[in-house]
Image (cartoon, rainbow, N blue to C red):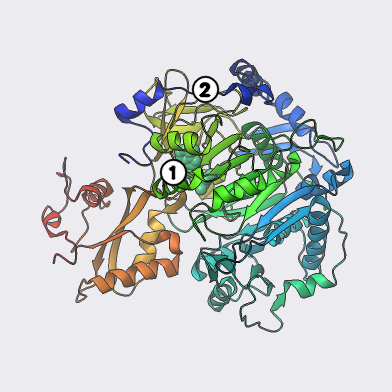
Amino acid sequence: MSSTGQATGGVDSLLQEHRQFAPPVEAAARAHIKSMAEYERLYRLSLEDPARFWGERAGELHWFKKWTRVLEWNAPDAKWFVGGKTNLSYNCLDRQVQAGLGDQTALIWEGEPVAPGASYEIRRLTYRDLLRETCRFANVLKSLGVKKGDVVTLYMPMVPELAIAMLACARIGAPHSIIFGGFSASAIRDRVEDAGSRIIVTADGGWRRGKVVPLKHTVDEALNLTDKVRTVVVFQRTGQDTPMKSGRDHWWHELMATARDTCPCEEMDSEDLLFILYTSGSTGKPKGIMHTTGGYMVYTYLTSKYVFDLHGYGENGQATGPVDLHWCTADIGWVTGHSYVIYGVLPNRVPTLLYEGAPNFPDQDRFWDMIQRHRVTIFYTAPTAIRAFMRWGDQWPARHDLSSLRILGTVGEPINPEAWIWYRKHIGKDHCPIVDTWWQTETGGHMITPLPGATPCSPGSCTRPFFGIDAAIVSKEGQEMPPNAGGFLVMRKPWPGMLRGIVGDRQRFVQTYWSQIPGCYFTGDGARRDPNGNFWVMGRVDDVINVAGHRLGTAEVESALVSHPRVAEAAVVGIPHDLKGTAIAAFVTLKAGQQPSEALKEELAKHVVKEIGAIARPEQIRFTESLPKTRSGKIMRRLLRELATSGSVKGDTTTLEDFSVLAKLRESDEG
Ligand code: WTA
């Protein structure tokens, strides 16, 4: 592979841009949006008359009380569907049961085989099953004293009980804060403290590549670091020995055994908090992004419907054609899982597939085998995964019947054209449109993306803004850039799925998103727009790096390193990586008297894993006697990046405080 994560910039992408793939005729025939002309017409309407556009779409969902105004906008504060009362759990479940779909499948779960050669564990939950379990767990939460507005932390494997717990929280108006199961005890501590959460729902463990990930054990470690949490509920997944602290810890199955099967929905105000999700920023600790009920619900519902062109059962419970099976491979612990495993999909009356384990266990055709067996129609994954599939070889997908697939999607990072072309050919067999969806934790749902029946695609471009999205490329001063010129990607108008704030930090919210470019939401990404109006995202322009589609702040990794007793100072940069897109390189200066060594490198890498989680493990650690800084004291990251990537430094270094520092940079094994 010649380039990774570099969908843009340079001659390559300019050539790619002219290589357009029109939507296949079959894709357009039954699509909700059938042509570019239809897209253009609706797009114009959505910007000119957002009240009408969003009001009509919101009407496709259930409201206990209709809103009085679609939008109230006092930048940077938006209120959508003002005065409306609804419940997302109701729109995912009750509504479907009432339409007569009680016995239809809502969720299919497949577990990882717990032993080599063991058969796969599969569970199918109908809308009625999922509603009953959700009600029971909602009653459990209530019996534990959880009330509307109380934050419930979920730290779970990919099992149906995670979906049940989310939907139960939404049902009673208790915002959830889901922490990805790969995060460490310290990360859990930081998040429960920041959110003021007093209850954690977890599991004894989850299966990953044949091993148990000991989630409850990590929760126990976290709770040694904080005394804020009063209650822990433990779902039994693996059956491994799990110490329980009496008075604090409760088994899920014991509480559920006596819980009632029905639980009324809380009538939530449109602007009531639905969930918090922590994500990395360019400074300090991760920030708790807040999403509210009405706008997020409508936005994820509509983006799911149009971007994945979902076809489910109708209002009357009847399907007018084949019903889709949607598979988004993201863990529910990330925003992609929130929006496109659960919240956007279920209200479309389309079943969703949930998978517990890794794509290469027991073999490298795990995903293709599942697509064949379950007849998946829509498959959504990350470029990092696609690069891994490419590396594993064409023979794995070739062994399976993938003819059920009709739409493919990608998310999380720029996709390099080679991976795009491979995906189209080997998975989509040249007949599935690919939707390269650009969006963020903060945006709630897709922002710039093709529509599969309408948009011609160029590999590496996320193409055009979704309805209602006024995306632009601007200079620092807010001036729109001419075609093909790089600049900052911003949004000039509010949209229903936008974040409403950062937990407990109004100033950071205003500063990060609304102060960088006058009058706009600042995404933190750099991009350009080609003369056809297609967007090409280049990646972050701030100190956030995207490792295998996961967001990390360089500052976060640096502070993890500096918290090690032998480290004086650290600087972290992202470097290109064939599989991960970007990997972490760390430059470390040690405290006086400390000697660099291979063993210390390993110890520091482990320390970062302990502080944050395995996703933050540095790929490279280099020891240096001091860090190159500008005269004003800023670390020269560009220079470090260059050094970490190529091993040498070119260009202007005249602002270096200490030239000699470059000569002293060295790998410990060399020195
Ligand atoms: C990057 C994930 C290029 C981008 C949904 C963004 C992408 C960050 C794409 C958000 C894409 C996401 N093409 N870059 N299709 N999708 N990104 O919050 O840098 O985990 O700002 O949300 O991922 O990451 P987050």
413 or 639, nearer to the observer: 413
Looking at the rendered structure, which numbered label has been put on residue 284?
none
Q: Is residue 34 visible?
A: yes
Q: Which residue is mark 1?
A: 394
Give the farthest residue toward the front: 399
Left or right: 479 with respect to 306? left
Instruction: Estimate the x, y position of residue 287 in percent, counting from the top left.
Output: 52, 54
Q: Quadrant of the N terminus?
A: top left
For image coordinates 44% across by 70% down, the residue present is 610
Mark 1 Cα shell of 10 Å, populated few (<14), some (14-19), many (≥20): some
Task: Mark 1 vs mark 2: give the one in front.
Answer: 1
Question: Helix, strand or loop at disc 1?
Answer: loop
The reply to whether the C-beta atoms of the residues labelled 1 and 2 are less than 8 Å apart is: no
Does any atom of ligand 1 lie closer than 8 Å to the CB of label 2?
no
Whether residue 335 can be seen here? no
Q: Quadrant of the C terminus?
A: bottom left
Q: Residue at x 22, y 52 (%)?
A: 629
x and y percentages locating residue 424 in the rendered image: 49, 34
Element assignment for label 2: loop
Q: In the picture provided, is 329 more to the left or to the right than 136?
A: left
Residue 154: where, in percent of width, then height?
64, 63
Residue designated by label 2: 456
Q: Amino acid at mark 2?
A: Pro
Determine the image quadrant of residue 8: top left
Which one is in front, 420 or 305?
420
How far apart marks 1 and 2 lie (CA) works out to 26 Å
- The residue at the point 25 percent across, 49 percent down is 645
